[in-house]
């Protein structure tokens, strides 16, 4: 079976989940991404990506404690799984490998 | 502090999956408050809404089907129904197939009936149009209804009765030779009509003005098809002229081709003013009946009330004075609504312009047959469902135990049966698309399933009938099944429902209907066969009829002698009218010692060899012969019936003549023939007088051919024809074809009844097959024990078949008298008919018994040969 694919946006979200480790939930991911990318991101897009990756087994989730500023609703925290990490590593190594194949080109 | 838009929140909560709701709504809320810090509340709210809409995608939306309780149940029921169908493929097949065939048969019958009843319905004033018919009662002729009327009747009714808005006459002019500069063709079905024709009837015009088209003398309307025979296109035809003989006629309009469902069929309409301008007296001409008259009445006129005034009308115009009511002894008038002309004219004679005239009583027969088939199919369904109940007891028991209400179970079973009915409807549609063209061939119709597509309201009718059938047939099994007591079922008690009286009654009904149809088919076929083979008193086989005009009449002797030289020709003669119709009646008189008697028998003028060619037997006297110069117009051969009617003891030599001959210059009777059926066998033999009038112009030549190759003979005749005749086409027909059209209604009925009978038997047998297999299965242990105790295969088979045979016998006893009564009624339509022989009933009963035996035999014999160990192993 082919390993599940990892889309570009999904990769970004997964990286962010990994980076925020244990503090990653919808709005936190959104804000960090918006800061890093310096552009607007839709919260729904993040939810879609998270749900998909959860189905693929890249992330797992748990509910946090009750908070007051969310209308009494719990946050849902995401953590990267070993399988998710492996996918990231693989993606990273492929890119690095290809990147290193670029000959020394001067752009001057 | 502004809170997030509550409506958007509600919407999202309502739409989104429960497991997502908390997270998503929470994140949105947080995002909202976060945005409030650096944006306006409106912007934040707008953004909230924007995000809500972003969740309208499959991953987030609730799956409603899996969440609503009522649909879950339906889905479950559907699944159970589907599994049940697959589990018992045999029974499912019988159920669905018989219902499919039943519905398909009904649909075909429905199409047929709609086709027949749609006749003449295209005219917007159809409810106020009547045909004027006569009842004639002439001495020497039986009383008869005729479709004919006199030229003076229409115009005078218009002037005498305010309730008559308009009239039109429809005068048959037969086959005419028309030509323009280049082309000439003979055209059939030409008529003279009054200028009012297009105002009364709605036959559409392609071009021309329907108000004025037929006002002028020497104007003519052609149908599209006819016009295109003479002209390249319709524009060219409109306003051009066409020649008929020496008359130049102006084409003032082009008619659309006459639809198939019109009792009037015409290709050319000549203006009646052509006749009346030359002969103004035509509008006041009485005494002779040769055309059809149609009247348009005021909206709220009672036709019966008008009819009552028609006696005085006749006296006024035909009597010597107002006291002279003698005319009423001969003529009476009645009005026939347009809607009845097609279907209710089977007792009307001289009805020449009534295309595809159909006996309306057969419509009822067809409807009845359709309903029978549907009943038989429905009974299969009910019987098999209840008989198979034993297999569903446990299902019902468990459902009840977990709390199913009676109504829920009832709904489940009803739904199942409706679904099957609808499935059958779809299949029936598919079957009919294939079967209708085949049926069209068999009964010579142009039925099409497009009818239902074109007119969805009829589709809706069929659909609701199917629903009704599903509901009704599901009703009894559903009630039966839901009535079980859960405790009894689950305890394993057998239900006492096996000896269902109701089910037996249904089998009796089913076989009663099938039996009635078998017997009816046998008798109908018997009658048709009788008509086909009855010795009508003349030879109707191998006779070729060829239309004649003036030119052919002139050269008749020449053609005749050349034809007689051919080896393939046995005889040639000619006559003024064709056999198979009621010959025209006109006056005939004889002079005896006691005075002169006037009578009005049927008359036909013939050529010398007529009796020889048709092999009509002369009982007394001699046939016509050229050796006697007086045989031309002054010698009469009459039939026995007329002799009896005239009361002549020694007819030969009695002075006689046409009604208009002066009493002192009569000819004489030279021969008497046996009574032969010159009319169709629906009618008794009428009085007849035959006479030779070579100068009157024969209508048709009759050529008797011999040998095995009629086509070669016809080619030879045509060869002779082409050498002598320039202007008249060689157009022939076989006499037996003509007789076939006379019995068309009857033949079609028998074809439909036969097909339906086969289907009915098929369906009934399938039901019996299914039922017997269930019965045998339920008695398998009894059979096992009996075998162990020493019963042989025959005894077992007899035991298992006995009940079914009893039912078939019972069906026979009940169905026979009813069938006898109905068939006897039908046979009264024929003056010459077979007697219902009770043997036919016995044969019918034996056939159904044999079919039933064979059907159940498969199961009963199989059961009787089974090893009892198999059945009893687990006891």
Image (cartoon, coloured by chain):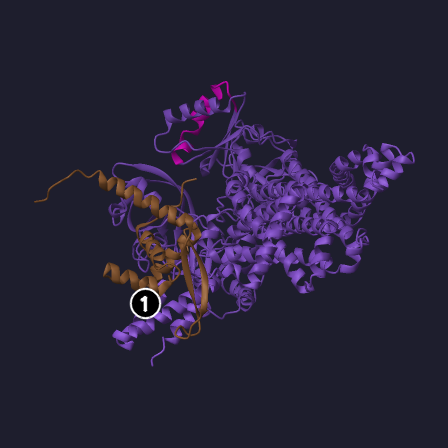
State which quarter of the image contains the C terminus of chain B: top right
Q: Nearer the viewer, residue B378 or B235?
A: B378
Q: Look at the image and say whether residue B557 sits in the magenta stretch.
A: yes
Q: Identify the residue at horizontal 65%, vertical 47% (top origin).
A: B95
The residue at the point 62 percent across, 53 percent down is B364
In the image, is B222 to the left or to the right of B434?
left
The residue drawn where x is 58% and y is 58% is B74
Q: Is residue B667 above or below residue B466?
A: above
Out of B730 and B825, give the one closest to the viewer: B825
Q: Residues within 10 Å of mark 1 (few under 14, many from 20)?
A: some
Range shown magenta: B550-570
Residue designated by label 1: B50
Q: Residue furthest left?
A: A108
The tint of chain A in the picture is brown
Any idea which chain is the purple one in this picture? B
Residue B46 position in % (x across, y down): 30, 72
Q: Residue B344, how many percent across, how many down? A: 57, 54
Query: Could you tell me what secondary structure mostly forms the magenta stretch?
Result: helix
């Amino acid at each position: 079976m082919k390993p599940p694919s990892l889309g570009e946006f999904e990769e970004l979200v997964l990286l962010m989940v990994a980076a925020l480790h244990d503090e990653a939930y919808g709005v936190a991911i959104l804000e960090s991404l918006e800061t890093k990318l310096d552009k607007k991101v839709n919260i729904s897009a993040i939810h879609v990506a998270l749900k998909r990756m959860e189905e693929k087994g890249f992330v797992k989730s748990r509910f946090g404690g009750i908070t007051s500023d969310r209308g009494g609703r719990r946050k849902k925290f995401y953590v990267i799984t070993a399988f998710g990490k492996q996918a990231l590593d693989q993606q990273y190594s492929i890119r690095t490998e290809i990147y290193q194949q670029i000959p020394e080109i001067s752009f001057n | 502090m502004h809170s997030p838009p509550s409506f958007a929140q509600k919407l999202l909560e309502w739409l989104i999956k429960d497991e997502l709701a908390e997270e998503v709504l929470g994140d949105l809320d947080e995002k909202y408050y976060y945005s409030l810090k650096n944006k306006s509340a409106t912007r934040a709210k707008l953004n909230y809404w924007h995000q809500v809409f972003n969740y309208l995608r499959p991953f987030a939306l609730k799956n409603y089907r899996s969440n609503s309780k009522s649909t879950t149940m339906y889905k479950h029921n559907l699944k159970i129904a589907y599994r049940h169908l697959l589990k018992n493929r045999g029974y499912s097949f019988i159920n669905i197939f018989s219902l499919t065939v039943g519905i398909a048969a009904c649909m075909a019958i429905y199409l047929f009936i709609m086709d027949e009843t749609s006749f003449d319905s295209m005219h917007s004033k159809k409810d106020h149009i009547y045909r004027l018919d006569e009842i004639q009662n002439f001495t020497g002729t039986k009383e008869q209804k005729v479709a004919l009327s006199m030229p003076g009747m229409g115009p005078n009714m218009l002037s005498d009765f305010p309730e008559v808005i308009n009239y039109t006459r429809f005068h048959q002019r037969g086959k005419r030779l028309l030509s323009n500069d280049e082309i000439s063709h003979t055209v059939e079905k030409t008529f003279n009509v009054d200028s009012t024709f297009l105002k009364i009837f709605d036959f559409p015009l392609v071009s021309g003005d329907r108000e004025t088209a037929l006002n002028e003398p020497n104007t003519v309307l052609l149908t599209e098809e006819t016009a295109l025979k003479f002209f390249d296109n319709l524009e060219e035809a409109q306003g051009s002229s066409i020649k008929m003989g020496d008359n130049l006629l102006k084409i003032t309009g082009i008619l659309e081709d006459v639809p198939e469902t019109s009792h009037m069929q015409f290709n050319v309409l000549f203006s009646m003013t052509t006749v009346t301008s030359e002969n103004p007296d035509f509008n006041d001409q009485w005494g002779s009946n040769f055309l059809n008259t149609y009247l348009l009445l005021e909206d709220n006129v009672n036709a019966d009330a008008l009819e009552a005034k028609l006696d005085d009308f006749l006296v006024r115009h035909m009597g010597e004075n107002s006291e002279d009511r003698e005319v009423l002894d001969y003529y009476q008038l009645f009005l026939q609504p347009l809607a009845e002309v097609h279907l209710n004219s089977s007792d009307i004679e001289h009805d020449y312009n009534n295309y595809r005239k159909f006996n309306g009583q057969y419509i009822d027969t067809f409807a009845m047959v359709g309903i029978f088939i549907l009943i038989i199919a429905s009974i299969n369904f009910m019987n098999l469902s209840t008989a198979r109940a034993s297999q569903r007891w446990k299902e019902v028991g468990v459902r009840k135990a977990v709390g199913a209400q009676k109504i829920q179970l009832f709904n489940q079973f009803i739904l199942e049966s409706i679904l099957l009915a609808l499935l059958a409807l779809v299949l029936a549609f598919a079957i009919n698309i294939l079967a209708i063209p085949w049926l069209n061939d068999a009964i010579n119709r142009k039925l099409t399933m497009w009818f239902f597509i074109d007119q969805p309201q009829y589709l809706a009718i069929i659909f609701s009938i199917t629903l009704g059938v599903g509901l009704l047939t599901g009703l009894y099994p559903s009630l039966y099944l839901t009535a079980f007591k859960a405790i009894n079922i689950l305890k394993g008690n057998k239900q006492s429902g096996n000896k269902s009286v109701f089910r037996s009654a249904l089998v009796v009904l089913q076989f009663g209907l099938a039996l009635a149809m078998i017997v009816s088919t046998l008798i109908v076929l018997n009658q048709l066969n009788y008509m086909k083979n009855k010795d009508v008193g003349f030879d109707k086989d191998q006779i070729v009829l060829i239309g004649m005009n003036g030119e052919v009449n002139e050269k008749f002797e020449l053609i005749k002698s050349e034809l007689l030289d051919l080896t393939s020709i046995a005889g040639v003669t000619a006559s003024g009218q064709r056999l198979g119709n009621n010959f025209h009646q006109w006056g005939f008189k004889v002079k005896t010692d006691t005075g002169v008697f006037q009578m009005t028998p049927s008359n036909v003028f013939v050529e010398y060899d007529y009796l020889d060619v048709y092999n009509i037997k002369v009982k007394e006297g001699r046939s016509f012969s050229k050796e006697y110069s007086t045989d031309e117009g002054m010698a009469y051969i009459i039939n026995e019936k007329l002799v009896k009617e005239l009361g002549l003891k020694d007819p030969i030599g009695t002075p006689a003549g046409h009604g208009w001959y002066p009493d002192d210059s009569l000819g004489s009777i030279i021969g008497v023939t046996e009574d032969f059926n010159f009319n169709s066998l629906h009618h008794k033999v009428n009085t007849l007088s035959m006479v030779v009038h070579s100068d009157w112009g024969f209508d048709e030549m009759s050529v008797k051919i011999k040998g095995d190759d009629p086509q070669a003979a016809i080619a030879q005749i045509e060869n002779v024809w082409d050498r002598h005749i320039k202007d008249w086409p060689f157009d022939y027909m076989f006499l037996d074809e003509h007789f076939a059209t006379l019995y068309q209604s009857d033949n079609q009925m028998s074809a439909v009844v036969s097909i339906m009978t086969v289907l009915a038997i098929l369906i009934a047998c399938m039901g019996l097959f299914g039922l017997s297999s269930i019965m045998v299965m339920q008695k398998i242990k009894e059979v096992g024990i009996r075998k162990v105790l020493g019963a042989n295969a025959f005894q077992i088979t007899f035991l298992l078949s006995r009940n079914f045979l009893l039912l078939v016998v019972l069906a026979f006893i009940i169905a026979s008298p009813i069938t006898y009564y109905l068939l006897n009624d039908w046979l009264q339509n024929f003056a010459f008919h077979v007697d219902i022989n009770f043997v036919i009933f016995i044969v019918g009963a034996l056939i159904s018994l044999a079919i039933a035996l064979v059907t159940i035999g498969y199961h009963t014999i199989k059961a009787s040969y089974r090893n009892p160990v198999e059945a009893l192993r687990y006891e």
